[in-house]
């Protein structure tokens, strides 16, 4: 087999092998991701990561060919061939790995490592495997200098394919992680008719009535699969949230959003003793964490805007002491309340708008509340829903037909 044909041959094998885990990941996402927009974004992220992952394989093949042409005596043995191919793969992967490392969000060491490995490992493995396959199929012989038979060449190709497949798995893992962190659509809606889409798009969390101590005064914090299924359930095409009297804090439910100026539409229903909570999260500069930057509590007797401020001035000794202990310098407070009569156990419509720091709330088509938040003008990360109330029995709050969209400029 000529060198040109060999390089062309393995240029096809490498991409085909690397594509398999990406395709499997897309099929898995498709099985659970009923939201067409979200699946499209996830697929795009996977495809982009796959395309980037092919570059080291192609470049490593070229570098290996150059090494053979310039220094043929260096690659007389199979072990030397593998080493040269691995070095070629490493060199070709290094610039991409460094680039991916630098653009990954700061402070996420796991993502940094996985992104870098996603480029380095396929490059090194595919470089080594392609080099060994080239040597054996070229007829150069094994490590004892004996010529390889057609059967041995076929066996080598068959062994090389799964080796390339395994080497591409870090890229698939990285791309799956990238899909989870893919850009969020500016507009989306949910009528809670698809349990599979609900499971993918929303993240439940809460505080169990166990493990209460000085460090965890609200109880054991759980989220995702560890959350109680009773906290959030789809019932008759709507979302029911429940809080329980033995728990010190209501559970929550969050979904990612994007943009700075946003509008949220929803329908809700509360019990006579209940309430609902709606929050908007982002990089809060006051508490210096990704946290809520605006929020509402709605009860049958009215609607309240709440906010977060520092408990002590940031430069004060008290603030420094809290920081040294790892305790939040945070004060939650009710900022403004409007007394209204909101009938329990019937559906109401709500529109929440946050433009800059200005929060505006419409209830059943009428202006209900305005409030200037402390830091509501930051880019938004997510919204949160919460049931609530005080009762000796479980209390249910209901949500339906949630829609999030950007506010038009200039309105």
Image: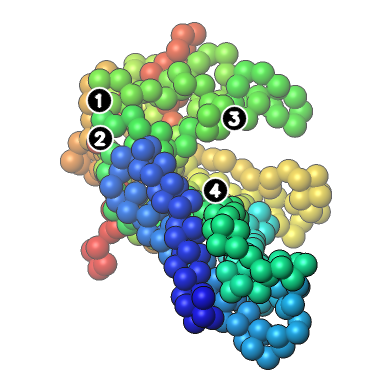
Q: Which residue bears the numbered disc 2?
A: 191
Residue at 62% in and 18% down: 209
Image coordinates of residue 73 in percent, x first then y, are 75, 84
Instruction: Give the SS element for disc 3.
Output: strand
Does 304 appear above or below 70? above
Residues at marks 2 and 1, CA–CA distance in whole angstroms: 7 Å
Q: Hey, which quadrant is residue 316 in on the image?
A: bottom right
Q: Is residue 214 left or right of residue 339?
A: right
Q: Are marks 1 and 4 in contact (CB under 8 Å)?
A: no
Q: Which residue bears the numbered disc 1?
A: 237
Residue depth check, mark 2 versus mark 4: number of the one nearer the observer: 2
Badge 4 density bin: few <14, some 14–19, many ≥20, Cα 10 Å: some
Residues at marks 3 and 2, CA–CA distance in whole angstroms: 26 Å
Q: Are marks 2 and 1 in contact (CB under 8 Å)?
A: yes
Image coordinates of residue 35 in percent, x first then y, are 30, 43
Q: Which residue bears the numbered disc 3?
A: 222
Foreground residue, 112 or 238? Answer: 112
Instruction: Give the SS element for disc 2.
Output: loop
Going from the N terminus, do you reach mark 4 or mark 3 first? 3
The reply to whether residue 34 is visible in this rendering is: yes
Image coordinates of residue 288 in percent, x first then y, are 62, 55
């Amino acid at each position: 087999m000529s060198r040109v044909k060999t390089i062309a041959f393995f240029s096809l094998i490498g991409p085909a092998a690397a594509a398999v885990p990406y395709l499997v990941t897309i099929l898995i996402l498709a099985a659970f991701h009923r939201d067409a927009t979200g699946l499209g974004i996830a697929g795009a992220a996977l495809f982009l990561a796959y395309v980037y992952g092919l570059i080291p394989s192609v470049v490593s093949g070229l570098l290996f060919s150059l090494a053979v042409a310039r220094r043929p005596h260096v690659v007389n043995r199979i072990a030397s061939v593998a080493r040269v191919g691995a070095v070629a793969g490493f060199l070709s992967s290094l610039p991409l790995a460094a680039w991916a490392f630098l653009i990954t969000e700061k402070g996420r060491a796991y993502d940094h490592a996985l992104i870098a490995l996603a480029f380095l490992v396929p490059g090194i493995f595919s470089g080594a495997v392609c080099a060994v396959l080239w040597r054996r199929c070229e007829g150069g012989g094994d490590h004892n200098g004996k010529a390889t038979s057609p059967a041995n060449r076929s066996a080598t190709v068959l062994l090389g394919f799964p080796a390339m497949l395994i080497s591409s798995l870090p890229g698939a893992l990285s791309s799956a992680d990238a899909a989870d962190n893919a850009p969020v659509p500016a507009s989306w809606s949910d009528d809670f008719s698809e349990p599979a889409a609900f499971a993918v798009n929303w993240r439940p969390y809460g505080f169990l009535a166990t493990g209460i101590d000085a460090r965890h005064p609200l109880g054991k914090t759980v989220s995702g699969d560890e959350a109680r299924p009773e906290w959030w359930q789809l019932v008759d095409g709507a979302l029911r949230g429940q809080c329980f009297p033995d728990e010190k804090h209501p559970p929550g439910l969050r979904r990612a959003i994007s943009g700075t100026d946003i509008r949220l539409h929803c329908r809700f229903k509360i019990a006579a003793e209940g309430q609902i909570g709606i929050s908007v999260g982002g990089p809060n500069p006051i508490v210096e964490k990704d946290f809520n930057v605006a929020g509402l509590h709605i009860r049958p007797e009215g609607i309240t805007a709440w906010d977060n401020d520092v408990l002590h001035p940031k430069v004060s000794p008290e603030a420094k002491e809290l920081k040294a202990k790892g305790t939040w310098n945070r004060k939650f407070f009710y900022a403004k309340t409007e007394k209204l009569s909101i009938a329990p156990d019937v559906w109401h419509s709500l529109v929440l708008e946050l433009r800059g720091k200005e929060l505006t709330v419409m209830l059943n088509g009428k202006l209900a509340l305005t409030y200037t938040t402390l830091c509501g003008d930051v880019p938004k990360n997510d919204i949160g829903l919460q049931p609530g109330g005080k009762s000796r029995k479980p209390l249910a709050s209901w949500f339906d037909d949630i829609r999030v969209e950007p506010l038009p400029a200039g309105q």
